[in-house]
Image (tube, rainbow, N blue to C red):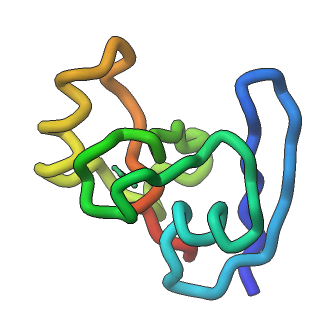
């Protein structure tokens, strides 16, 4: 199973195994990773699953889709992804 490292803003690194193809958001929720609330359940409406993808993984995750890009316009930091869209490799 792929292992995803969730790094909090304070540098705390928590690695959890997430099923292949599962969203990064669900991986966080199912493993009680703090900081990813996912209030809208992955409907791309709340931005509480906003994450930054390490440069080493950007090619695998791909660019933010149109819905993510639209939501990111409302955030101060306009980069990143929504964990509810990014999937475990
Ligand atoms: S869970 Fe709401 S945008 Fe991802």
x then y, percent, for residue 55: 56, 40
x then y, percent, for residue 2: 72, 78
**Residue at left 39%, top 44%?**
81
Residue 84 lies in what quarter of the image?
Answer: bottom left
Viewer-closest of 37 and 55? 37
Report whether 1 appears left or right of 86.
Answer: right
Q: How many marks?
A: 0
**Residue at left 31%, top 22%?**
78
Residue that protrudes farthest toward the front in the picture: 39
x then y, percent, for residue 4: 72, 63
Q: Quadrant of the C terminus?
A: bottom right
**Residue at left 81%, top 22%?**
10
Q: Is residue 70 above or below residue 40?
A: above
Q: Is residue 72 above or below residue 48?
A: above
Q: Quadrant of the N terminus?
A: bottom right
x then y, percent, for residue 42: 35, 63
Residue 47 lies in what quarter of the image?
Answer: top left
Viewer-closest of 38 and 8? 38
Q: Is residue 32 above or below residue 47?
A: below
Report whether 26 appears left or right of 4.
Answer: left
Viewer-closest of 89 and 72? 72
Viewer-closest of 31 and 76? 31
């Amino acid at each position: 199973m792929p292992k995803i490292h969730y790094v909090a803003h304070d540098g705390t690194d928590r690695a959890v195994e997430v099923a292949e193809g599962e969203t990064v958001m669900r991986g966080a929720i199912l493993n009680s990773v703090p900081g990813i609330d996912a209030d809208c359940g992955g409907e791309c409406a709340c931005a509480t699953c906003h994450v930054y993808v390490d440069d080493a993984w950007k090619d695998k995750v791909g660019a933010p889709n149109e819905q993510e890009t639209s939501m990111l316009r409302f955030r101060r930091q306009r980069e990143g992804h929504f964990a509810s869209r990014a999937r475990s490799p």
